Image (tube, rainbow, N blue to C red):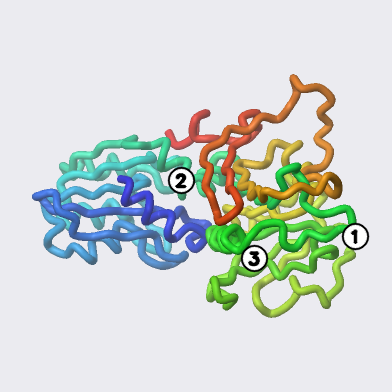
Amino acid sequence: MARARDLGLRVLGTTSPNPPVGAVLLDAAGAVVGEGATSPPGGPHAEVHALAQAGERARGGTAVVTLEPCAHTGRTGPCADALIAAGVARVVVAVPEPTRLATGGADRLRRAGVDVELGAEQAAAAEGALAGWLTGVHEHRPQVVWKVATTLDGRVAAADGTSRWITGPEARAAVHQLRATCDAVLVGSGTALADDPQLTVRDAEGRTADRQPLRVVLDRRGRVPATARVHDAAARTLVSRAAGPAALLAELFDADVRRVLLEGGPTLAAAFLAAGLVDEAVVHVAPTLLGGGAAMVGGLGISTITDALHLQVTDVTRMGGDVQIRLRPTRHTGWTASTGGGS
C-alpha cells in the first residue's frame, strides 16, 4: 500500500477532477507484476495500467489500490469489471469510494467471488495524494495549501519591501516541485504588483516544465496590468474578482481545480486562515533576522492567546541552510480524514 500511495503522489496535480490513485498488482505468489497511477482525464485509471503490465500474471493475484475501484462507466469503463475480467482473486483498498456516482465497486467484486478488504491504511492514503480530491467530495471546494517563505522572526519582506531571496536555492527548488503537484497557484493583486511573479513550474536549470498549473490572481479592482508576467504565454491565467476566499474557491472548483497553492502575501493568507480555508501550510524558514518589515500573516482578529490558531507540525526537513515545516491547522472548519472523510 505504501508503494501504491507513492504512485498516486507521482501524478498529483495531473488528474483533476479525477482522483490521483495508485495501484500495485501482485501475482498469486505475492510478487509485484504491475503498477499504475491515474492518467489525465479521459485516460486509463490506475488499475487498468497495472493490469496491462501484469497480463495473465494477474490471474489469481491481488490488487492493492488507494481508492475503491469504480463501478460506473464514464470516459472509461468500470475498473471493478476490469479486475474481475483479469481473474484477480483479492483486492485491498485504502479509501472506500465516497461518491454516489462511482460507489459499488467493492460489492460488484464480492458478487463475482473476489475477496475485498476495505480501509487498509486508510488515514495515510486519505491524507496523502487523495486529500485534495476528498476535500472536493466532502466540501465542494479545492484543498488549499499555503506556502510562505519567512525569516526566523516571521518576516516575508524587509522594511523597504525587498524579499528576494529570503530562502536559498534548495527551498526555492522545493517550491517548484510543490507547484507541480497543484492544479492552480494563487496570489492577490498586491503580490502580483509588488513582486511581478511568473508563477510557473521550472526545473533546476530554470527551464519551464511542459505541464503548468493554472495561474490565479485575485484582483477585484483590476489593478494588475496586462504587461505583468502572470499574463505571459507560459501558462493559463485566471483573473478573479471573487468577493472572498469561499467565493474564489467555489469558482475554482467549478473549473475542475482540486488543489490550490496559496502563494499570496500576508493579507490574502490572513483571509484564508481566518475563514478556516487553509488545509495545510508549508513554511520555509531562513535563519535570518530582519527586525522589521512585513509579517508572514496579516491580522486574524485574534486578541487573546486562548483564541490562537494552532497548527500541528507534520514534518520538518532541512533544505540547505533553511528549514521546511509542514503543518495542519487544528482549529479548522474544513474536512479532514480524522473527522469523518473517506468512509
Mark before the other along the chain sequence, 1 or 3: 3
Under tag 3, what secondary structure? Answer: strand
The amino acid type of the residue labelled 3 equals Leu
Q: Residue at x 54, y 71 (%)?
A: 204
* Numbered mark located on residue 128 in the image: 2
Q: Residue at x 81, y 28 (%)?
A: 302
Distance, label 2 to label 1, CA atoms, is 37 Å
Q: Residues within 10 Å of mark 2 (few under 14, many from 20)?
A: some
- Name the residue tied to disc 3: 214
Q: Position of residue 46 (x, y in %)?
A: 34, 58
| Closer to us: 305 or 139 | 305
17 over 214 or under it: above or below? above
Under tag 2, what secondary structure? Answer: loop
Residue 189 visible somewhere in the drawing: no
Distance, label 1 to label 3, CA atoms, is 21 Å
Residue 140 located left or right of residue 165: left
Residue 334 located left or right of residue 111: right
Q: Position of residue 125 (x, y in %)?
A: 41, 42
- Name the residue tied to disc 1: 221
* Numbered mark located on residue 20 in the image: none
The amino acid type of the residue labelled 1 equals Arg
Identify the image quadrant of the C terminus: top left
Distance, label 2 to label 3, CA atoms, is 22 Å
Q: Position of residue 79 (x, y in %)?
A: 31, 55
Q: Residue at x 72, y 62 (%)?
A: 165
Residue 80 visible somewhere in the drawing: yes
Furthest toward the left, the residue is: 29
